[in-house]
Image (tube, rainbow, N blue to C red):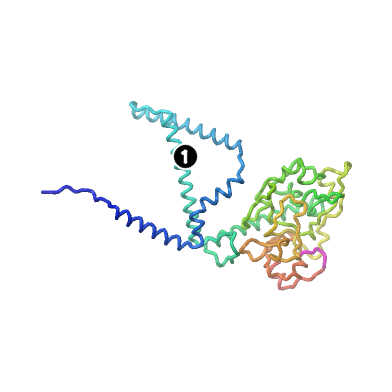
Amino acid sequence: MNTPRTQPDITGAGWIMFGGVFLVALLVVLVALQEHTEQLILGWLYFPLRTIPRMTVDWPTVLLGTLCSLLFVVGFHRTARWFVRTTNRSIRWSWRSSVVTSALMFVLFASGTSLVGATHQLVWLISDRHDPTSDAVATSDLGPVAQARDAARRTITRYRLKEFGYAFHNFHEVYQSFPPGGMMNEDGELLHGWAVFLGGYTNYFPRDLDYRLPWRVPPNDRVYKCQMPDFLNPSQPGPTFDAQGYGLCHWAGNIHVLPVISVKTDPGAPRNLTDLIKQSGQAISLDQITDGTANTILLGTVAERFKPWGHPANVRDPALGINRTPDGFGGPPGWQGAMFLMCDGSVRFLDEKTDLKIMQALATPASGDPIPREFELKYLR
């Protein structure tokens, strides 16, 4: 006589054993991740707490998204109703069914996207990703994935500096000089900086600026309360806006080549940039760089005390060295140096251990200070 089979009953002890195995496996994963444990457990909470206060509502985008969602529900309802009618006339498809199904699809889509992101983050952590806000680490100490990301970011930085090089030289072609590092009026009030002068030769073009008025004064201030990739170093951690909402800049000009000049702003003074620059006669031209354009710094990366890209005095002195002072030039954690745009349009990476005498020679356009031949061959050619 055959006895009927019954499904095995999972007892309380079985559940306890399962829970114990799960906790041990979780503990092993957390120990393996070590310093990334907190980020893995609480990162989902840190991100919204840090991001939501800085978010703004773009109402046209919200309205467009709402309209598209409604059109999707209407289209789905009509399609589902037609399909049900042609396959089984006894079933009636309601609006409630369409709304619930559409909402479920939206949730599944968001869940899938979140799962991909979470998986990517976990793989990134396991592959030895380093927190960019932590202490500097050499590129050779990074994992293969992190090394590839670092190389890609450096390439983007080099490309963006190169683009500024083209803009500076196009500006020079028109005005027979580089733009000033900044302008101020007769009272010493700062007006505008070098970045906005290049607007017509780059990816951005500010309109309706009155160059006689300070950059923070309406209507000029609205132009600078934005951010663009042109002014950001992808390897540089930290905020991209200041406390007043002005977009920060990860580059600074060489004050010896891009000086802050004084211009007249009386009612009879010219309103446009061209006449203001010509009137001052203080901007530097290529003919004045007698030390050689390939041996003179024009622009460089900075690591601390970022100024807004529209700041009229976003210039520094390369003679202070690299990564030696917050007010000098420098690079992000791990670079151990800085990237510079030279006056000939080339982009060079200089080690933070570069001698201050060499940095002084690279900073000045016509000092006649010699540059060691071995340094020139290694870094400038």
What amino acid is at disc 1? Phe
State the image quarter where residue 237 is shown: bottom right
Question: In x, y percent, where is residue 319?
Answer: 76, 65
Q: In this picture, which residue range is highlighted in magenta? A: 363-367
- Say left or right for 329 vs 103: right
State the image quarter where residue 350 is shown: bottom right
- Residue 343 seen in render: no
Question: In x, y percent, where is residue 260?
Answer: 81, 55
- Residue at 78% across / 49% down in the picture? 192
- Residue at 68% across / 55% down in the picture? 250
Q: Regarding mark 1 in the picture, which secondary structure is present there?
A: helix
- Residue at 71% across / 49% down in the picture? 202
Dot 1 surroundings within 10 Å: few (below 14), some, or many (20 or more)?
Answer: few
62 vs 40: above or below:
above
Question: In x, y percent, where is residue 209?
Answer: 77, 42
280 vs 99: above or below:
below
Question: In x, y percent, where is residue 360?
Answer: 77, 67
Nearest the viewer among 88 and 42 is: 42
Quadrant where the C terminus is found in the figure: bottom right
Outermost front residue:
12
Magenta stretch, overall SS: loop
- Say left or right for 173 vs 350: right
Nearest the viewer among 317 and 349 is: 317
- Say left or right for 206 vs 184: left
- Is 109 colored magenta in this rendering? no
Residue topped by disc 1: 106
- Residue 102 seen in render: yes
- Say left or right for 109 vs 286: left
